[in-house]
Amino acid sequence: MVEFDWSIFLEANKCIAVPEELFSHVEASLNNGIRQGMLLEVCHKTNPDIYWIAKITMVCGHLLRIKFIGADSDFWCDISGTKVHPLGWCGKYDELIEPPDDINERYGDTIIDIMKKVLMGGQSVSIEALNNKGLSPIDRIISGMKVEVQNILDPYKYWIATVSENVGGRLLLRYDGADDDQQDFWIFFSNPRLCNFGFVTNKGSPWQFKYPGKVNKFSCKNKLSTQLRQSAEESIKEPTPADLFQPTPSLEVHNFVTGMKLEALSPQDMKSIRPATVTKVFNNFHFLVIIDDHLEDYEESKMAWLCDSMHPYIYPIGWAEKHNITFKTPKIWKEGPFDWDEYLSMTSSVPAPDYCFGNKTPLKGIEVNMMLEAVNPQNHAEIHVATVGSIVEHMVCVELLPIGEKVWYAHDSDLLFPVGWCDSNNYELHIPDTSTNKESPKLAEEVRNVKEDMKSSEEWCDRIFFNYKCYSGPSISRNKLSQLPKHVGPGPLSLVLKEVLNKIISASYKPAKLLKDWETEEAPEEGMRLEMLRAKLKTSTYHAYVPIATTADQVMSFCREMCIKMQACPCLFGPVEYLEHCPQNCQQVDKSIFHNGTERRGRPKGTFSSKKKKKKSTPEKREKEQQMSQDITKDGEYIESEHSAGSTPPSEPGTRPNSPESGIEYKRSKRKRQEQKNTYPKMEMKTRGAKLPNFALQMKEAHWNKKDVETMYNNTCVTKKQNSPDSDTENDTNESSSNSRDAKNISDVSDSEEPELKKLKFTSYDPLPSDNKMFEKDTSLPWMKDKLKLSPNPLEWSVDDVYSYLINTDDCKLIAKKMKEEEIDGEAFIMLDLATIQDFLHMKKEFALQLCKHITMIRWYYIVNYEDNDESL
């Protein structure tokens, strides 16, 4: 490790350090509440039951140098083992207070006047400081203590955290019950977001506990109670002192109103000023300011400030231009210089008046080119050597060495530290390069030459751009796609292309299906090579071998081919960036032109979701399979009616329904696939009156034809008639028999019994609807009639059609906007199921069930009226 000496560095660069007294948070961390000149009551050396007033002449932690009033000499006193009390303690508890004998003999009665004079100008040590035995706050905070941390976006939401490490008052905290989605984070102990353990419980409503992760894993009251109880039990081991984390001092009432425009420092990098909006006012003291470009995704991007009237990082409009600070224009702004008046008119908003921002104290005692230590705002674990670049009002621009980043801080920020702080607390300091190695330029030149050689070869790939404005197809989440980086690369060809495909997989609704579309089971074409890609869905991991381009001139065609396979715009990703208009004009044309109709169903090889071993078929079972296949052949109905064209059973990758292979082999592979999928969870949808069957499971296993559906619903109608008031005992008996037969689990039905029931796999808690009018030919959806002008075929619905349908429903109008944001068209809408809705659209279960009800109804309608036509084609 390179030795770094601040004194040598300052002398070599002819700089001076920022004065230590300007770092108020560091001074507070060292303050134990006892100062020189304070008074206290101390017992006599010879008689511990008699007290006299003493004055502090020196403070060294728990050791005090004190002198009795009237005495000539002072002495050391350890307050952790000596009887010392604040002024007034003896009078309160009726203890004797008088001077020692030598002082009494010298001054006599005049000692009373001397004592009164000292008390008039003196200050007593607080009882809290004495109880803390002279320890500073940083010495009192130990690992294992519990604190409550305020949410960065809501002043009423807190969560419990445990101190993992204490470095000079900088605390490394970990949220209780956190998984890998919440990393440990650094925060200074005096930060107003920290409160004592028990703060929320004592305050009551509206303060509440809310887990800060993307998914609230403690939304269930039982889980929340269990976690809080566990945290309370752990806090007993290391109780947090009540006076250590004090609540925020009284704040000034703000004058901000929702919708006001202002300027704010970017919370992400703290480098530039950006236009922002007051979006929420919590109370008279707190409000939320969000950067305009992140009004929709501020919860994930954290591009927002929880503010009060004196918040240092919000400013009136025009502040950046006035002080010549970098200002980043919003995305909706056209080219040219930014104009606030035009922007306010464009957004129909008003600016926040100057008087709303309070009077912030300008900097004193700090100058340009002074040195200090500063935290990297993009990685709070790093502290860098820094130099002051410029000063504007209460803000200071600091350059972090050696990375050269210039960031803005408030002058009283707890992210700034005096020179030598890291060395005093034994913490790593990122230092500039002070070596004088002459061979380093040669080494850098050699590395640069190697890179140039690689760039000139065919194995180097330039940037691959993600054009998120292009049509992303039915398998990709538009929201997740927009969160990807703008490009990948440049770099080695295979690494860049694999990273691009992995990014697309991470934005997919069903990664396994996407891998299935990309994989190949044959030898790769010339100029291509197979690379294994992986995808993870819940607890299952899938892999597939995907052909990858090997030369730079194949990149364009490779990207287009992969986009076409996922039924997206061919320009969705590639070496060309399209900022405005797509050459395919994918936003205006009908999206069905991108659907090539060769969708492959099933999962790729390498799935680990099935945990049960497959049973070997017995001779009797094979005979039944052969007999059933012969019956199907005699009736002239081939098994192709149960599967869409081009589908491939996972157990037989090269066998397709319309292949010339025997029906027996295909039937056997189909049955194996169905047995594997029996482990899927069943989707229950509670509705009024008739209940809907489990279509989320059934549509995965087999396509229905109209004959199957009508058979099941005709049986239902018979049952409904038997439930009429005129039914007699015989009918009741028949009804009971019919219900018991329908409720029989599919695993208990033999191959020769009820083939329709075997195929549809109804269970006892999948009751049938009570009306089959929906299945009459050319029936129109009754809830759309005379209300919406939609295409009769749901597969032809656009994103706006799906939105129009949902917004006109009573139970799903609240989620219509979210479906539109995800660009769910008719085809994608019919493919949704309960698991997909909950896992990828992040909906609550009650909304997901309501949406599943409509998906199921439209799916039925499509099966009856259009699937026959599709199969005939």
Image (cartoon, helix red, strand yellow):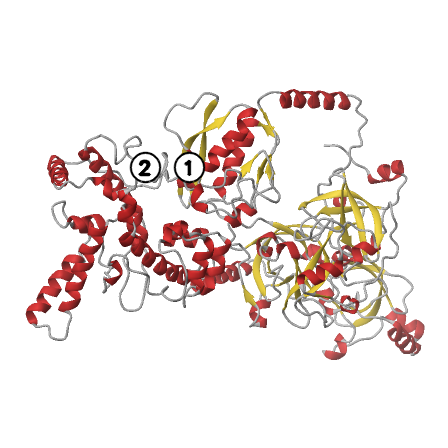
> How far is mark 2 from mark 1, CA to CA?
16 Å
Q: Is residue 123 visible?
A: yes
The amino acid marked with disc number 2 is: Gly
Q: Which residue is mark 1?
A: 515
**Can you say whether 734 is above or below 185 in the image?**
below
In the image, is 840 to the left or to the right of 349?
left
In the image, is 41 to the left or to the right of 485?
right
Name the image quarter holding the C terminus.
top left
Name the image quarter holding the N terminus.
top right
Between residue 589 and residue 667, name the one nearer to us: 589
Q: Which residue is mark 2?
A: 646
Q: Is residue 682 visible?
A: no
Q: Residue at x 83, y 47 (%)?
A: 388
Q: Residue furthest left?
A: 730
Q: Position of residue 37 (x, y in %)?
A: 86, 65
Q: Position of residue 591 (x, y in %)?
A: 45, 46
